[in-house]
Structures are given as structure tokens and as C-alpha cells.
Amino acid sequence: MTAPGSARETRLMRDRVETPSGLVLRRWTGGDAASVLAAFADPLIRTQSVTPVDTPSAAERRIAQRTARWADGSAFAFAVVDGADTVLGQVSVGPVDPRHANGWVSYWTTPPARGRGTASRSCRALAHWAFTDLGLFRLELGHRVDNPASCKVARSAGFPVEGLERQKLTYDGARYDVETHARLATDPEPAAG
Ligand SMILES: CC(C)(COP(=O)(O)OP(=O)(O)OC[C@H]1O[C@@H](n2cnc3c(N)ncnc32)[C@H](O)[C@@H]1OP(=O)(O)O)[C@@H](O)C(=O)NCCC(=O)NCCS
């Protein structure tokens, strides 16, 4: 594809990334529907989606949507799997703003995969991929201030804090401040956790 950051340059865009820790980032497939459905039974993951993912066909639609966005270049979602191809989570970059070579990063991990560096390592691998394969320059993310685990993931993946967006999001009638982080292609690679 033509990378967002450099109109004339053609890059090799991998759709599978193997990490030194054994975690693998690969594209979602139709066969992952049961894993997606199970993941969205978790209330913390459920709040990530505006559209409910509570039936097998809703999970299939979600995967199909991810596939379509990858094809049109607007967003790139990877399943995070272990060596046995068990789904542990998702890391994604999108929407992508090709004009400015920016992208929005998000992540979730399944409850059994949490607390052992899955999100931090995967987010680090995603950032490297987004800078090298996709040619982006700036990656942004944000988390509610009552989500300290997400803050740790961001810092550990090399995204320092940039600011605070006051009362940005509403959940169940309550408004939440959002802390923003970003990482640039020119920032140093974070130390392996
Ligand atoms: C946030 C989330 C992705 C973290 O995934 P994970 O795989 O457990 O992340 P990691 O193991 O890489 O790191 C989590 C860190 O947060 C810490 N942590 C976990 N819960 C915490 C809490 N309640 N308070 C403070 N720190 C916490 C862990 O100890 C770990 O710290 P360490 O790096 O110093 O060991 C996962 O909890 C999740 O999917 N949450 C629901 C969806 C979500 O919130 N996504 C982010 C939206 S912005």
C-alpha cells in the first residue's frame, strides 16, 4: 500500500507480527467469532462498543466490519493471540488520518490474559508496526482517568501523557475526564517490560 506518511513510497504492510514474548498480532478471521463473543461478555470490554456484541451474528458482523476497514485503509485491528492461537485481546490503530499521518490506538485484553503484560507488549508491537509498516508519524490514545491499568499500558508502550480532556465521555449518566497520551515515530523505543 501507499503509506500515509509518504505518498510515493510503497511499504510492505505485514498482517502478522510475531513478538519476542511469543505474543502474535494477526488479522481477525471469521473463525474468531466465538472468541469475540466471549470477550464482549466482560463488562469492561462491552463498554468499548456502541453496538452490542451479544450474539454470534453480532460478533461475525464486528469481524466483518474490521475486515472492511482494513481493506479501505481506515483502521487496522489485530487479534492478539498466544502460541496456541488463543485470542487474548485486540490492539488497533484507527481511525487513521492519512493527511497528517496520525492514528488513534486502542486495546483490550480478555480477563484471563490481564495482569501479565499482554496489553503493554501488544501495544508496543502495534506502535512499531504503525510507524514502520503503515508509515504513521503520530499515534494518539486516551483513557478515562478511572482506568489506571490503561494508563500503565500507554506509558509502558512509550506513550507519555499529553493532557486532560475534561468531562469528555458519558457512561451511565456520569461524565468522565480523559487523559490523553501520544507517541511519535521519533520518540525512543520504550524499554522492554
Ligand atoms: C486496560 C487493559 C487493556 C490492561 O490489559 P493488561 O493485559 O492487563 O495490561 P498489562 O498486563 O500489560 O498491564 C497492566 C498494568 O496495569 C496494572 N493494573 C491493573 N489493574 C490496575 C488498577 N486497578 N490500578 C492500577 N494499576 C492496575 C497492572 O499491574 C499492570 O502494571 P505493571 O505494568 O506495572 O505490571 C485491560 O484491563 C482491559 O482490557 N480493560 C478493559 C478495556 C479497556 O479499558 N481498554 C482500554 C481503554 S482506554
Image: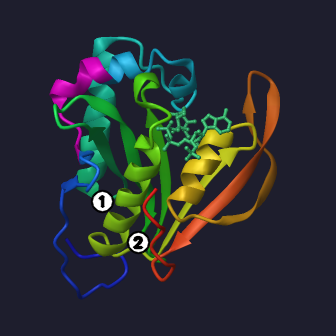
Crowdedness near tag 2: few (<14), some (14–19) or many (≥20) residues, C-alpha within 10 Å = many
Q: Is residue 87 magenta?
A: no
The amino acid on which the numbered mark 2 sits, given as a three-letter code, is Pro
Residue at position x 35%, y 18% in the image: 37
Q: What segment carries the magenta color?
A: 26-35
Q: Which residue is mark 2?
A: 98
The amino acid on which the numbered mark 1 sits, given as a three-letter code, is Gly
Q: Which residue is mark 1?
A: 73
- Residue 36: image quadrant is top left
Q: Is residue 173 above or below residue 163?
A: above
Number of marks in the image? 2
Crowdedness near tag 1: few (<14), some (14–19) or many (≥20) residues, C-alpha within 10 Å = some
- Element assignment for label 1: loop
Residue at position x 50%, y 59% in the image: 157
Residue at position x 24%, y 43% in the image: 67
Residue 39 point in image, percent of width and height = 40, 22
Residue 72 point in image, percent of width and height = 27, 56
Most foreground residue, 113 or 39? 113
Q: Is residue 177 above or below residue 86?
A: below
Residue 168 point in image, percent of width and height = 76, 45
Most foreground residue, 11 or 113? 113
